[in-house]
Amino acid sequence: MDFKYVEVNKEEEIAVVKLNRPEKLNTLNLEGLRELLEVFTVLERDDTVKTVVLTGAGEKAFSAGADIKKMEKMSFQEARVFSILGHEVTKKIENLNKPVIAAINGYALGGGCELALACDLRVASENVRIGQPEINLGIIPGWGGTQRLSRLVGLSKAKMLIYTGKVLNAEEALEIGLVDLVVKKEELMSKVMELAKEITNKSSLILSFVKKALNEGFNMDLNRGCELETELFSLCFSTEDHKEGMEAFLEKRKPEFKGK
Ligand code: HXC
């Protein structure tokens, strides 16, 4: 895949998607969003990819968000299109049939934070600066920040962050659960790849079931969520991987999952 704003590399069964506009802190314009959508659409269909890592090129940023220069002159209609496309991208990431880990290597602001929020897990380097500073530009988050941030850290903390535009450091982000893990800057990619490999060793099919149960169940009431869990739990019993997992346990060996 050859793109202007996004780079994709495969390391065994892990795809590393890099936002690639480091001179502008990996900010995103319409073209960058379209590229990201295409990348994740292709990765979704690629059975050789089991886990995806999303990160930013360069030393300073995961992404400083949407391109303010491009947004400055946007009309109401253009802003709407920009928001809708960003939502398509974040939904695609959120609902991807495989786990996506954000490796947050510095600034994750506005749309950058929103991209990270759409991922399954967030690992940050010590120098992370993360938040939703849109209020300072006279706008509100537009790629899911008002929805996913509150679901992740709670409504009140989300309001605190979005009303003030406060940018959090690693310790603060970890404390409220906005990131899951903080690691040394130079160890970010090795730690994330370690985590990705650990997940990749599981059954990709069963992971897709459990991601669905967690994500869809989170937006349901408890009873419906539990019903969904029962459906997906039962579905595991129609797979080869569940046989392999249980046989391996009983034979005291490591399972070899095939994603079937
Ligand atoms: C356009 C940006 C940018 C942005 C950085 N740059 N962020 N350009 N849009 N969001 C550009 C700078 O203009 C500069 O270009 C280059 O990247 C390097 O940035 P500097 O500001 O020189 O770096 P530094 O002094 O280290 O400051 C880093 C920073 C600051 C704290 C991250 O750049 C910053 O505050 N950026 C804005 C962050 C922000 O508000 N993001 C939210 C955007 S709104 P030149 O050409 O001068 O070298 C959003 C909404 C999403 O994301 C939803 C839309 C629907």
Image (cartoon, grey):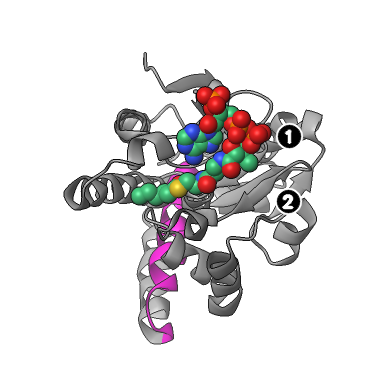
Task: Please rate how many residues cluster around mark 1, counting C-alpha atoms within 10 Å: few if below 14, some from 14 to 19, many from 20.
Answer: some
In the picture, residue 192 is in which quadrant?
top right
| Along the line of sight, the residue nearer the viewer: 14 or 157 | 157
Q: Position of residue 88 (x, y in %)?
A: 29, 47
In the picture, residue 212 is in which quadrant?
bottom left
Q: Position of residue 81 (x, y in %)?
A: 22, 46
Above or below, 243 against 62 in this view is: below
Whether label 2 lies within 8 Å of ligand 1 gets the answer no
In the picture, residue 147 is in which quadrant?
bottom left
At mark 2, the secondary structure is: strand
Q: Residue at x 79, y 56 (%)?
A: 171
Q: What separation in Å lies between label 1 and label 2 (alpha carbons)? A: 10 Å
Residue span colored magenta? 199-222
Q: Position of residue 38 (x, y in %)?
A: 30, 30
- Quadrant position of the N terminus in the picture: top left
Q: Position of residue 145 (x, y in %)?
A: 45, 60
Above or below, 62 against 166 in this view is: above
Magenta-drawn stretch, dominant element (helix, strand or loop):
helix
- Quadrant position of the C terminus in the picture: top left
At mark 1, the secondary structure is: helix
Residue 102 visible, this angle: no
Above or below, 229 against 74 in this view is: below
Give the mark, 1 or 2, whose residue is nearer the N terminus.
2
Which residue was labeled with disc 1?
188
Which residue was labeled with disc 2?
181
Q: Which mark is residue 83?
A: none
Q: Residue at x 42, y 22 (%)?
A: 5
Q: Amino acid at mark 1?
A: Leu
